[in-house]
Image: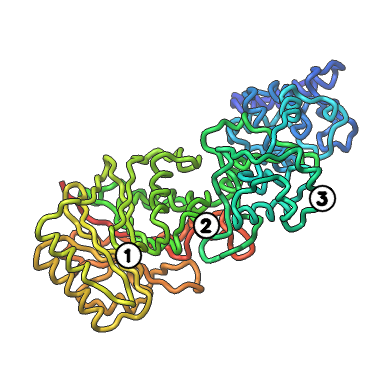
Amino acid sequence: MGQTPSSVTSGKKMSRMERQTSFRVLLRRSMKKKAKLSHTFSLPPSNDSGCSAEYPELMNVNTATEEQLMTLPAVNRQLAREIVRHRQMIGGFKRVDDLALVSGLGAEKLELLRPEICIKKQLSRTSSCTQSLDSVRTNGESRLYSINSSSIFQLQCVPGLNQEIAANIVDYRNKKGPFKSLDDLIKVRGMDNIKLLTAKQHLSLELRKFESMQALNGHVNDWPELSPFLSNISMNRSIPKSRFSFPKLPNGYASAPVDDILELLSAYSHRPLLEDLFTYERHGVRCCRLASWNLHQLSLDKIKNPGVREVVCLTILENKFSLIAIQDVIDVGALKEICDELNCAGLRRVREWKSNSRNWRCYRPASHRESLGFIYDAGDQITVEAVDEPSEAIRRLLDEVAGLTSERFTAVAQAFAICRHPVVVVNVHCFERLTDEDCKHIQRVTELSRELNLQLTVVGDFRTWDNVESLKTCESLIDEDVVTTINTKHIGRSSILCPGTIDKSNFNRHSGAVRSGLCHLAIPRDWSWGGPASPFCPVWAELNVPD
């Protein structure tokens, strides 16, 4: 008698979890008998608060200040600040599990906090009057926003401006150039004298370095002029988040830093679980993965979208591609942007990827064929280097490819040294059905490689399977039933070919197409979000490079 259910062991030794549960029950019962509460806790106003009146010691994370949050287990000032910032960004937590998305919290800390916290959507009478010193300091800070570099997210926070006018300002700036006077804002569609008078005291013409980068835009894939609202969002890589101060929006919540918004979009963008863990070895033989990817109108504007950049970089890293042939490159600098992100990442997911050599390089031939290029890893696991001074035999083969001219396809060849083994890669992009004459020209290249005893592979987007089959002297490592497009709207057939037969080549018959993890919530899809980085899937094949 007198024993609580949690204290009865029935002859068995209690587990650690049972002892912790028992301790919490006893603690709560003892707390109910005491009238004194810590001054850091908010007193629940009524029984319908969402925090149970039976346990008044539970902290409401929707109303708690930074100082109050710091009384919780494993919560320091930085984590408390992140909880408050995330709460303001999403308009309040709806359930305890939402705290898992707070930067620096994670599942383990959440389990420690779960017995101590609760969720209540309404604002508490006490917490509305109790602000932390940091909250007062942040809300009290003010600065001028530059109309020549601020994003739509920032301009819409200026008194007198809404999202539509902010988007029109950015659109006007992109078309006409920087504003020379604040009074020129009257020329922007939707602006009037009253709005201009209200907004002018919060604006300046000064260019700010951390606001100058375009991050999200409507020129992604084939969606031109999607919306002026998406044309310019700033993204900072070097200035700490604590340096930013954001005014309050009309709904009472502080406007969220763009980095936090992108972080939230990234957290909800699915990344695949890899079934085959590739270790640069197959059956005891060292090998590497060659890949081909049509990135569909790859421009500087497109690759500056953080969603596109994250998808491209993570797809390369997750699948451990050593050499990637890229098709449909509009701007040469876009390849360098990809390498810069891989080498010195600004995106958290890319930065935290452990098995990254951070020694990526790009190559584009110095010719008119600017739509084709290569990205390769010059790291330690599998070293890939572009051959600047090829041998006479390789030079003869490269000259033969340079002579391929047609309106139906474009092709470029480059010699690489993969772990000191020379390999000539021919990058092809077909636009129409190949003629018999086109096929003869390409077959002449493959026959010459066998005559010179050189390792050659033909990769790229051949548009249709008929074009792949028409190259009689080559065998495809990608089967016909492998789908290499995301939807039926776009026509494409990416493949990797080897001269002769696969059995007589250095390829080990392991190949595939990547079809998951190609979408991101920061990429437009028609008039919604969650689009793909490209409508075409990357394909890959493994090439043996024995010691």
Q: Which residue is mark 2?
A: 519
Q: Quadrant of the N terminus?
A: top right
Check disc 2 and give the amino acid type.
Cys
Q: Residue at x 68, y 33 (%)?
A: 245
| Of residues 54 and 123, the one drawn nearer to the viewer in this rendering | 123
SS for dot 2: loop
448 sits left or right of 124 in the view: left
Of badges 1 and 3, nearer the viewer stands 3
Q: Residue at x 75, y 23 (%)?
A: 132
* Disc 3 crowd, CA 10 A, few/some/many (<14, 14-19, 20+): few
391 sits left or right of 331 in the view: left
| Of residues 352 and 54, the one drawn nearer to the viewer in this rendering | 352
Q: Residue at x 44, y 74 (%)?
A: 491
- Residue 533: horizontal and vertical position, in percent? 49, 58
Of badges 2 and 1, nearer the viewer stands 1
Check disc 3 and give the amino acid type.
Asn
- Residue 446: horizontal and vertical position, in percent? 18, 70
- Of the two numbered discs 2 and 1 on the same chain, state the one appearing first in sequence: 1
- Residue 287: horizontal and vertical position, in percent? 24, 51
Whole-number angstrom distance, CA of label 2 to CA of label 3: 43 Å
Residue 58 can be seen, yes or no: yes
- Of the two numbered discs 2 and 3 on the same chain, state the one appearing first in sequence: 3
SS for dot 3: helix
Q: Which residue is mark 3?
A: 193
Check disc 1 and give the amino acid type.
Arg
Q: Which residue is mark 1?
A: 369
SS for dot 1: loop
